[in-house]
Amino acid sequence: MEKVDSAYDLPRSIFGHNFITPKEAAEVHGFVYGRELLEYLADAINAPGFKEILEWLQACGFVLVSGPPEGKSLLEVRAMDPDLFCASPHNKWWESGDEEFSRSNKVEIGLLALRSRWDPVPYPAPKTWGDEFLPPEMRYLNVTEITYGMTTYEKARNAYLYYHVWVTSSSVDSRGDKPKVHRFDEGFVISTDWFGTVLYPEGCHLLGK
């Protein structure tokens, strides 16, 4: 596994503590990553042009979080760490069978880039953007990706990625509204009603299989 472990030296040297490795995600969530998946990620990280992509993401204020070994829905993300979520009955509306987004919108394997700054992305993407491993452009993340990124970062670093702001997702509920994620002192809340500061973070998913 030496090849796999050393492959993460590159993103770790660029992002520092803002890179959550598969090993760290496994430790905080109890994941088991298969050897084939880990070797695939190791090869992809060392692909030509990927260093420039990582440097661009870091310069633009992104953090990098390793995704799960298989796709997870919002309900499954909560089931991994139920104590992190507010226990109020008002935080259970998205369990309803009418709210398809909580089941169909998933966080996938690979690397999840979440922007931790509020200003517009200041730099043009590198010329290598569009490589077979990379998405063609930035996008707004779905509610599961945002929630997974926030909970994983918090557990691995004992720090908040976003706190006391409403983080808007690209997901859509049964009424056509976009669910938002908020980290209160009492825990995570998913809601379409909000008050206070709203954040629209850009992000992307890298190296998905």
Image (tube, rainbow, N blue to C red):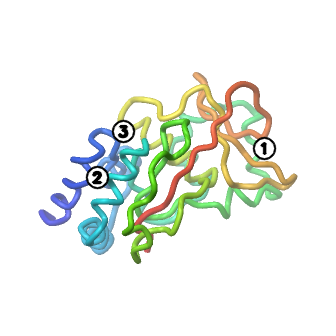
Which residue lies most toward the right here?
Answer: 175
Question: Which residue is at the front of the view, 157 or 95?
Answer: 157
Q: Residue at 44% x, 64% y: name it.
A: 109
Question: Does residue 107 sit above or below 28 in this rendering?
Answer: below
Where does residue 183 sit, x and y in percent of width and height? 59, 31
| SS at badge 2 | helix
N-term mark: 1 or 3 = 1
Where does residue 47 sit, x and y in percent of width and height? 27, 71
Q: Is residue 121 left or right of residue 17?
A: right
Question: Mark 2 and mark 3 in contact (Cβ < 8 Å)?
Answer: no
Question: Mark 3 and mark 1 in contact (Cβ < 8 Å)?
Answer: no
Q: Is residue 46 left or right of residue 26?
A: left
Q: CA distance from mark 3 to mark 2?
A: 10 Å
Q: Residues within 10 Å of mark 2 (few under 14, many from 20)?
A: some
N-term mark: 3 or 2 = 2
Residue 180 in view (yes/no): yes
N-term mark: 2 or 1 = 2
Give the residue at mark 3: 156
Q: Residues within 10 Å of mark 3 (few under 14, many from 20)?
A: some
Q: CA distance from mark 1 to mark 3?
A: 28 Å
Question: Which residue is at the front of the view, 37 or 81?
Answer: 37
Going by the numbered disc 2, the residue's amino acid type is Lys
Going by the numbered disc 3, the residue's amino acid type is Ala
Question: Which residue is at the front of the view, 46 or 156?
Answer: 46
Give the residue at mark 2: 23
Give the residue at mark 1: 93
